């Protein structure tokens, strides 16, 4: 290996930082730090907003019932396709769930989601997705005569679902802005594009990435209670009893029946009652394609972390009291969204006491030569933004645990921020401890020695395996005659293997 061994973190010293800059750092610390009292207030407000979302009147957190009813047993079997329309990539997978409990085989192809597609037309979007599916099937099943393959489509945006194969897009999130899709069911245009190309698939379930994460993680871990995504966007799903969902009362479902709720907690506090927003959060919102929406998400999610950092730096350059990057051309930094979350990760990961990597990065990418005090400020700011993100995220997890009365739980998490942002996991765990007042760890062991009572753990692949499992669970329900949220049971099975007796797509519980 060349170069120094990476240290987990540098000590850092503010010794050379001049007084006015120190004052500025202090101001930023005050602005971006969320103390324990505030974390608790946010959590409490979040609990009541989650409940409100389930009420008939509704609230700003959508709390979308997903018609994914209950957890997998581990005994699901069959072959399924999964399509994942993420923010950056489109992924097509074929998943085989074998007899062995909790096992799966997966083959997959990734296609880049062209940036223009995010603000293009609906026809372009569905056409592109259907083309990718077609390519996948042609490549992996050339010349075969196929049954209609059941497909789980992970569409990770807020959608109202009257049925599991239906989803009216409530609004685009994560910077998407494609005209003519909001307020409409996304399934028919998707199916039309697929049918036009003669691709042999049957959409069985439209799912959210969080629901997929919950189900995929529960497949291998019976303690999983919540599925979270901390990535480009931020959201969670959990299982709720139908009896706790007044807005489904008219359906007369068994009150004890469980159904996964896609919270869409990114919309938490759109009314700005409790979140400690800074002037920079206000600008991020104002300049986004959907101002007033996703207040919580815009303070937490990967899409916005770099932008917040950038806005602060530009402000401090223009601020006559601080004047960072004095006399330098900051035009590259002025470009909105020019810094992403991985840029912030790299700053926090810089192992050198003199922040050499950060210095070089600013110089090569932004053509800015930073002084040592400026580098200290840049580093501290990244820590503040990253820490705030992790601590606010913990409020959402704590709120679900408190609402459900979970004293212990596993939470399955996925997404680039959770997986790659330095210290995100530890900072989140620390915040959970503060909010939930833990004095001991799990099983009475001293904190930090055994496991924490609520642990946020890396999840199984929700948009692949999770989508396949939800398709399997749905077909099983249809076969068993449990038809809540199923529009047309016969049509759902028609042409698939599950239709033919003796070749069950899904085995009954063993
Ligand atoms: C956004 C979407 C939500 C998704 C999350 C994570 O919040 O609205 O549906 O789960 O991002 O991808």
Image (cartoon, grey):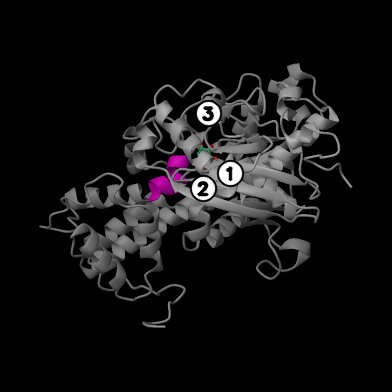
Q: Residue at x 74, y 16 (%)?
A: 250
Residue 235 in view (yes/no): no
Earlier sequence position, callout 2 versus callout 3: 3
Work out which residue is located at the far right of the displayed protein and give it.
510
Residue density around tag 1, few if under 14, some if 14–19, many if 20 or more, within 10 Å: many
Q: Is residue 497 magenta?
A: no
The image quarter containing residue 82 is top right
The image quarter containing residue 150 is top right
The image quarter containing residue 17 is bottom left
Place of residue 344 in the rendered image (x, y in percent of width and height, measured from the top left): 37, 58
Q: Which of 162 and 31 is in front in this view?
A: 162
Name the front one of labels 2 and 3.
3
For the residues bearing labels 3 and 1, Cβ distance under 8 angstroms: no
- Circle 3: element type: helix
Q: Which of 160 and 104 is in front in this view?
A: 104
Place of residue 275 in the rendered image (x, y in percent of width and height, measured from the top left): 47, 40
Left or right, 364 with respect to 408, comes to: left
Place of residue 19 in the rendered image (x, y in percent of width and height, measured from the top left): 23, 64
Q: Nearer the viewer, residue 240 or 93?
A: 93
For the residues bearing labels 2 and 1, Cβ distance under 8 angstroms: yes
| Residue 323 against residue 176 in the figure, above or below | below
Residue tagged 1: 396
Residue tagged 2: 392
Task: Compute the Cα span from label 3 to label 1.
Answer: 32 Å
Residue density around tag 3, few if under 14, some if 14–19, many if 20 or more, within 10 Å: some
Q: Which residue is drawn at 61% across and 57% down?
A: 458
Residue tagged 3: 190
Left or right, 165 with respect to 34, comes to: right
Left or right, 209 with respect to 475, comes to: left
């Amino acid at each position: 290996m060349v170069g120094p061994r990476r240290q987990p973190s540098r000590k850092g010293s503010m010794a050379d930082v001049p007084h006015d800059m120190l004052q500025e750092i202090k101001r930023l610390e005050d602005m971006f730090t969320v103390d324990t009292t505030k974390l608790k207030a946010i959590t409490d407000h979040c609990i009541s907003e989650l409940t409100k979302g389930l009420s008939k009147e509704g609230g700003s957190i959508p709390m979308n019932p997903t018609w994914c009813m209950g957890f997998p047993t581990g005994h699901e079997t069959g072959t399924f396709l999964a399509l994942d329309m993420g923010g950056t990539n489109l992924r097509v997978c074929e998943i085989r769930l074998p007899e062995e409990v909790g096992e799966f085989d997966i083959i997959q192809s990734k296609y880049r989601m062209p940036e223009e597609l995010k603000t293009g037309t609906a026809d372009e979007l569905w056409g592109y997705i259907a083309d990718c599916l077609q390519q996948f099937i042609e490549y992996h099943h050339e010349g075969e005569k196929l049954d209609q393959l059941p497909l789980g489509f992970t569409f990770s945006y807020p959608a109202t679902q009257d049925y599991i194969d239906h989803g009216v897009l409530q609004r685009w999130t994560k910077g998407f802005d494609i005209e003519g899709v909001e307020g409409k069911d996304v399934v028919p245009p998707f199916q039309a594009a697929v049918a036009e190309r003669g691709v042999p698939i049957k959409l069985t379930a439209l799912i959210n990435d969080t629901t997929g994460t919950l189900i995929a993680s529960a497949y291998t871990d019976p303690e999983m209670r919540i599925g979270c995504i901390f990535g480009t966007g931020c959201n969670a799903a959990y299982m709720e009893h139908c009896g706790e969902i007044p807005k489904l009362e008219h359906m007369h479902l068994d009150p004890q029946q469980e159904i996964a709720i896609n919270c869409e907690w990114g919309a938490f506090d759109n009314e700005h009652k409790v979140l400690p927003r800074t002037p920079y959060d206000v600008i991020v919102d104002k300049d986004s394609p959907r101002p007033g929406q996703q207040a919580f998400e815009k303070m937490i999610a990967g899409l916005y972390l770099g932008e917040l950092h950038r806005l602060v730096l530009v402000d401090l350059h223009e601020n006559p009291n601080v004047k960072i990057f004095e006399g330098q051309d900051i035009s590259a930094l002025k470009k909105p969204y020019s810094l992403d979350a991985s840029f912030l990760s790299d700053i926090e990961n810089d192992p050198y006491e003199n922040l050499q990597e950060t210095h070089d990065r600013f110089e090569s990418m932004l053509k800015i030569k930073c002084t040592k005090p400026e580098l200290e400020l840049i580093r501290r700011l990244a820590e503040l933004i990253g820490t705030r993100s992790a601590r606010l995220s913990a409020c959402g997890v704590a709120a679900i645990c408190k609402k459900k009365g979970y004293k212990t739980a596993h939470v399955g998490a996925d997404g680039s921020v959770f997986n790659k942002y330095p210290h995100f996991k530890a900072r989140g765990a620390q915040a959970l401890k503060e909010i939930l007042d833990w004095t001991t760890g799990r099983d009475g062991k001293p904190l930090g020695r055994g496991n924490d009572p609520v642990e946020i753990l890396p999840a199984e692949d929700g948009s692949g395996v999770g989508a396949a499992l939800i398709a399997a669970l749905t077909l099983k329900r249809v076969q068993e005659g449990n038809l809540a949220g199923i529009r047309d049971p016969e049509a759902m099975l028609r042409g698939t293997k599950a239709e033919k007796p003796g070749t069950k797509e899904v085995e009954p519980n063993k």
